[in-house]
Amino acid sequence: MKIHKEARESIIITVFIFLIVNGLAYRLLSDSLWWLKGLILLISFGLMSLVVFFFRIPSRELTQDNQLILAPCDGEVVVVEQVAADEYFTDKRIQVSVFMSVFNVHVNRNPISGVVQYSQYHKGKHLVAWHPKSSTANERHTVVYKHSNGKEVLAKQIAGALANRIVNYLTIGKKAKQSQEMGFIKFGSRVDLLLPLDTEISVKLGDRVKSGISVIGHWPDNTDSQ
């Protein structure tokens, strides 16, 4: 297991806070309160470990299949429905949303291979990630991939109530490879996919998925994916 490169700043801040809190506890608390010193040490060490754990990148055998649309993140499927697109597209699309808790791996991966047609960051609120308006009201970053079959897929990284930074590594005009890193969202969030209406969906509400492994859907059998 590796630690993600986005962890550096957060880990440095967390270690600094850990040292300050325990240093003050050691100097200011009486020796008779040894149990309180130990409790502070235990709790602060646990919180520091959770921060490090949050940025983990587990070893995985990632999927590469040009006919499949893969999960862009780890988490629970919370939306599978037809919607009227509110960005880039003007038609109806199938929305599949995956909610990430703070305990999920937060690496975001490309659901398909394709040329990046659109990449746009939006400032916004920090509603809880499962709120119906989070897709349009929260801080978010939207990208659109154009598959080799001509179809386009939109992926939207959405910040949640705790998320304080969205990172996206994609550039317009560049070829993105399926299962490679799209970006990272710190501390709880969600990713929406907007798919063509003829996409054959493979997940349902409540399913648990893993980025770069779990299949969200696939192109219809009559689609040329070459």
Image (spheres, grey):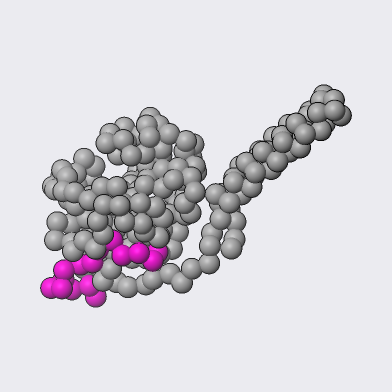
Total marks drawn? 0
The residue drawn where x is 62% and y is 41% is 47
Residue 86 lies in what quarter of the image? top left
Give the image location of residue 161, x and y in percent: 43, 34
Extreme right residue here? 31
The residue drawn where x is 22% and y is 51% is 80
As displayed, is residue 70 above or below residue 143? below
**Magenta-span inclusion, residue 216:** yes
Give the image location of residue 62, x and y in percent: 43, 69
Residue 35 lies in what quarter of the image? top right
Give the image location of residue 189, x and y in percent: 41, 43
As displayed, is residue 158 above or below residue 224? above
The residue drawn where x is 13% and y is 47% is 91
As displayed, is residue 54 above or below residue 31? below
Q: Is residue 164 left or right of residue 152?
A: right
Residue 24 lies in what quarter of the image? top right
Q: Quadrant of the N terminus?
A: bottom right
**Most foreground residue, 52 or 141:** 52
| Residue 96 visible (yes or no) | no
Q: Which secondary structure type mostly characterizes the magenta part of the structure?
A: loop
Query: What range is drawn magenta here?
Result: 212-226
Extreme bottom residue here? 226
The residue drawn where x is 13% and y is 73% is 222
